[in-house]
Image (cartoon, grey):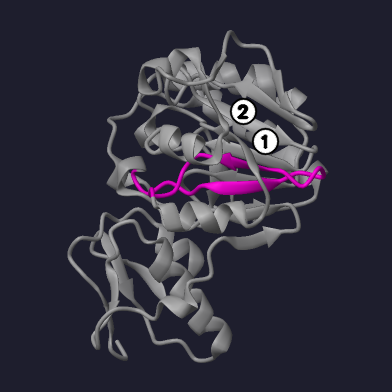
């Protein structure tokens, strides 16, 4: 449409639809163009989708997209940036930069590996920590940590995915990983899944829960719980009362900001719904984001 197309490498990961939902939709199990951009804001949204897509499937008929329009890392709020450049080795997961008051930066999960991208990210400050939410998002973690001179974190339940991690989170109790930043073990999606809570404002939820555009609510990805939906229900029930945040920032699925009291209400409801859930076959493409 208008010279742009989505090629057949599309994995239906939803990343492009998160960034340009009015322009790119799901048709027959993959992303497709709905209409061309109408103004500068929509053109920017399109290029965010282009440069986040892990398979580089969004292309202009005339050739490669204009790299000058690559917006990443892209500010979501005054304390968080979206890394973009999602990696096929993390199933297209989103990753983030968390800016700290000291002027340092933490990376949550990892984008595709590139020395040029690493330089972009350190332009925001020295990166002190690479925080992995679970095994599915561990790819590139060691390379980024070594490039930054940063500490690599993972939970012991998923340690085999990053056996050379510098910091290993153990057990089920919250642990402070930096000033104002706490990790909460949340086994369920995988044995070593965790979430990171920063400043009672940002919740980096990994693949434990996300904001669904389909339901307009917090949801768990029931068809891609690789370990145990029952364990995830237990984890959420144990942890929800300790969490207060405005932003949900997942690996897969959409992001959302709401008042903290509203997020707490929705999280409490999610705990109840997850407690009633039953195991389902693991099918990534079955999700309706």
Alpha carbon distance from label 2 to label 1: 6 Å
Residue name at image x 39 percent, y 72 percent: 24
Q: Which residue is mark 2?
A: 271
Estimate how packed mark 2 is, as few (under 14), some (14 to 19) or many (20 or more) residues with alpha carbons within 10 Å: many
Q: In the image, which residues are magenta?
A: 91-113
Relative to 261, does residue 49 appear above or below in the rendering? below
Task: Give how far across and how far down residue 258 sits, in percent.
Answer: 74, 52
Q: Nearer the viewer, residue 51 or 33?
A: 51
Which disc is residue 289 wearing?
none
Which disc is residue 267 wearing?
1
Looking at the image, residue 81 sits to the left or right of residue 279; the answer is: right
Task: Give how far across and how far down residue 175 sits, in percent.
Answer: 70, 18
Provide the major secondary structure of the magenta segment.
Answer: loop
Q: Nearer the viewer, residue 213 or 17?
A: 17
Residue 23 quadrant: bottom left
Quadrant the N terminus occupies: bottom left
**Disc 2, disc 1: CB below 8 Å?**
yes
Residue 85 quadrant: bottom left
> Is label 1 in a helix, a strand or a loop?
helix
Residue name at image x 44 percent, y 26 percent: 189
Relative to 198, does residue 43 appear above or below in the rendering? below
> Is label 2 in a helix, a strand or a loop?
helix
Q: Nearer the viewer, residue 248 or 175?
A: 175
Residue name at image x 48 percent, y 72 percent: 70
Residue name at image x 69 percent, y 31 percent: 268
Task: Give how far across and how far down residue 282 sits, in percent.
Answer: 29, 32
Q: Nearer the viewer, residue 272 or 252?
A: 252
Looking at the image, residue 220 sits to the left or right of residue 180; the answer is: left
Task: Give how far across and how far down residue 205 sits, in percent.
Answer: 58, 36
Estimate how packed mark 1 is, as few (under 14), some (14 to 19) or many (20 or more) residues with alpha carbons within 10 Å: many
Task: Mark yes or no: residue 216 visible.
Answer: no
């Amino acid at each position: 449409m208008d010279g742009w197309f989505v090629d057949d490498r599309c994995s239906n990961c939803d990343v492009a639809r998160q960034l340009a939902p009015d322009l790119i939709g799901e048709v027959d199990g993959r992303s497709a163009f709905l209409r061309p951009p109408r103004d500068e804001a929509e053109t920017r949204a399109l290029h965010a989708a282009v440069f986040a897509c892990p398979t580089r499937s969004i292309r202009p008929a005339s050739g490669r997209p204009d790299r000058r329009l690559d917006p990443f890392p892209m500010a979501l709020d005054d304390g968080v940036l979206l890394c973009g450049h999602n990696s096929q080795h993390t199933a297209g997961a989103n990753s983030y930069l968390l800016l700290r008051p000291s002027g340092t930066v933490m990376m949550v999960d990892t984008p595709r590996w590139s020395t040029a991208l690493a330089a972009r990210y350190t332009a925001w400050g020295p990166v002190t920590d690479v925080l992995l939410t679970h095994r599915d998002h561990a790819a590139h973690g060691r390379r980024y940590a070594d490039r930054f001179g940063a500490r690599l974190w993972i939970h012991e339940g998923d340690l085999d995915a990053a056996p050379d991690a510098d910091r290993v989170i153990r057990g089920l109790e919250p642990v402070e990983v930096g000033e104002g930043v706490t990790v909460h073990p949340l086994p369920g999606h995988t044995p070593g899944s965790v979430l990171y809570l920063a400043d009672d404002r940002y919740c980096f939820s990994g693949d434990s829960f996300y904001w669904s555009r389909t339901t307009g609510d917090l949801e768990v990805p029931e068809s891609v719980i690789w370990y145990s939906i029952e364990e995830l229900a237990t984890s959420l029930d144990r942890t929800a009362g300790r969490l207060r945040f405005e932003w949900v920032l997942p690996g897969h699925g959409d992001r959302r900001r709401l008042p903290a009291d509203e997020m707490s209400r929705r999280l409490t409801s999610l705990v109840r719904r997850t407690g009633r859930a039953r195991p389902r076959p693991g099918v990534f493409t079955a999700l309706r984001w």
